[in-house]
Image (tube, rainbow, N blue to C red):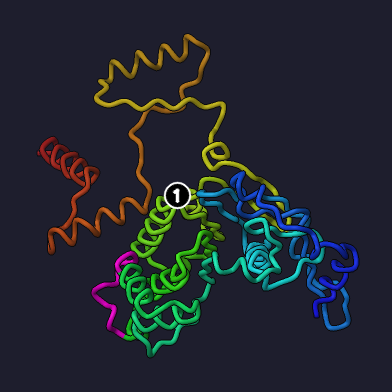
Amino acid sequence: MDTDSTALAENEPNAAAQPVHNDDEKSGVIIETRNLSKIYRDFWGRKKVNALKSLDIEVRQGEIFGLLGPNGSGKSTTIKLILGLLFPSSGRVLVFDKDASETSKNERIGYLPEESYLYKFLTAEETLDFYGRLFDMSGADRKKRVAELIQLVGLAGAKHRQLKEYSKGMTRRVGLAQALINDPDLILLDEPTTGLDPIGTREMKDLILALKERGKTILLCSHQLADVQDVCDRVAILHQGELKELGRVSDLLKVQDVTEVHAEGLSEDAKSEIAEVIKRHGGTLKSIDNPTATMEDLFLNIVRESEARPGARRVSAAETQDASDSGQQEEAGQ
């Protein structure tokens, strides 16, 4: 038995006997941690690692909540505590207003671990049917649910192939489908885009957003900053087991002392007038330039155009301008 859980039981002898209320769930709080800490100890009970320190967060119904931090910051430990796979050294975790140690809550939870341990000799259909049996689903319900999930994750064309023939992205999608087999209300995703190429990453993020549209509550654990920014409503940033920042992504990323204006079709004279207005009102014009897309957007657009027009090379506006400038220089030199 975990020595920390024994100490917790001694400090809170009546915790298990406390009545269960539904106030938190009715108010929209699905996960709540209260002064949650976890200390890993060696065989002799000596402190080895202080993995989590006094964590207080709430995950609300219908949101995508991100746990963000570098490796070793306590993200995976937090997920394991929520699932009841670990006992806290101090504090409590409430899920659906139940203590995390109550296994009955797990019937409403789907979990995608960082590494999905799937049977490679099974097909996608057989894999999902197997996990459906673990939830004691009837044959008719399993068949219907498996078909829905394979369609949802985009594997209809490969559902009869063994998983050993799948790419990393396809395997990850089967893992997500497995996490959804019981139609959970709460979905825990531990590094869902790990090992995926840009296309697989975008598809995984689109699936996560689609699950939110279906009313699911999602806790996403990642150290990929772009993934969290793209899909999460709120984030908690952890470092060395401590909560460093908590809030809405839009609020945390907003630069308060900079004003951004987007316009189309401005002439050079208009840009000069805008610069004068800014200067007249005491502001400082940093730059007037064209906005840039993300590297992910550029990559995905190139792939889509390549699929639509095989063999054609995409020519950027910058290349066209460079060719024009080069031609003008050659004419001037003649």
Of the pair 260 and 274, the residue shown nearer to us: 260
Query: Which one is nearer the viewer's eye here, 263 or 209?
Result: 209
Left or right: 24 with respect to 333?
A: right
Q: Which residues are magenta?
A: 151-161
Residue 159 is one of the magenta-drawn residues: yes
Residue 170 seen: yes
Q: Confirm whether the magenta stretch covers residue 216.
A: no
Q: Position of residue 66 (x, y in %)?
A: 56, 53
Picture residue at 22% right of the left edge, 57% below the top: 304
Residue at mark 1: 230
The image shows residue 28 at horizontal and vertical percentages of 59, 46
The C terminus - image quarter: top left
Q: Residue at x 18, y 60 (%)?
A: 306
Side (left or right) of 248 relative to 292: right
Residue 62 in the image: above or below residue 82: above
Disc 1 crowd rating (10 Å Cα; few below 14, some 14-19, many 20+) is: few
User: Is disc 1 placed on a helix, strand or loop?
Assistant: helix
Q: Residue at x 37, y 52 (%)?
A: 295
Q: Position of residue 126 (x, y in %)?
A: 36, 84
User: Residue drawn 52% across and 75% down?
Assistant: 115
Q: Amino acid at mark 1?
A: Asp
Specify whether 197 is left or right of 15: left
Residue 127 in the image, given as x and y percentages of width and height: 40, 82
